Amino acid sequence: MAEQLDDDFQTAFWNAKRTMVEASEAAFRRYGVRAGQQHILRVLWRQDCQSPGQIARRLGLATPTVTKMTSRMEAAGIVERRPHATDRRLVRVCLTQRGVELQAVIDQEMRAMTESALRTLGPHERRQLVRFLHEVHQNLASYPALTAAPGASDTALQPVKPDGGGQAWNSGSVS
């Protein structure tokens, strides 16, 4: 019974996440925004001209992830990089006029998508779902595989090499 519950949760969560990404791609593509970039835009709409590190901290992402995403956004004319006023080593990500103008349509798309996703739930159930998702996030944040030191293993099984060779990495170096 427990295995079935695990499988049902994993499958349901995966399907919901995948469909949310697909819906986001479809909704935002016509505005030149890729799925996930709306979250960076929301951070910048609240406070423009932030460093990639500041954006990353606000979203719980790695700075290189934000750097890559904002590079694509810059190529699309949504944001621009500007040098920091007092420290030339730092860069700030700032909205272009186009990025500012996208706020109304992206907010509208996000509301419409949320309404579509939650249309069968009442107000109380919607609040519960959001609370439960926050709890799942918090629970997984302490998952041992996320918090273990690189190379640490608590089982006799070893991960296989990413090249698909099927052989386990030995605990030393990878050839």
Image (cartoon, grey):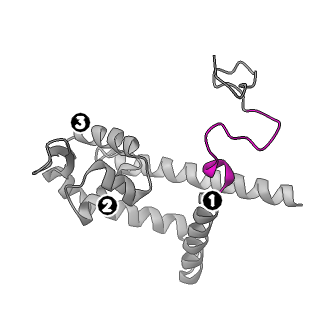
* Quadrant including the N terminus: bottom right
Say whether residue 148 is magenta: yes
Classify mark 1: helix, strand or loop. loop
Mark 2 Cα within 10 Å, few/some/many (few <14, many 20+)? some
Residue linked to disc 1: 142
Residue type, numbered disc 3: Ala
- Spatial CA span between label 2 and label 1: 27 Å
Density class for disc 3 (Cα within 10 Å; few <14, some 14-19, many ≥20) is few
Residues in magenta? Answer: 143-158
In this figure, which residue is indicated by the disc labeled 3? 75
Q: Quadrant of residue 129?
A: bottom right
Residue 6 visible in image: yes
Judge left or right: residue 107 versus residue 125. left
Q: Where residue 166 appears, x then y in whole percent? A: 75, 21
Question: Magenta span: helix, strand or loop, mainly?
Answer: loop
Do the residues under discs 2 and 3 have CB atoms within 8 angstroms? no
| Identity of the residue drawn at 20% across and 49% down | 92
Q: Position of residue 81 (x, y in %)?
A: 18, 43
The circle drawn on residue 42 is 2
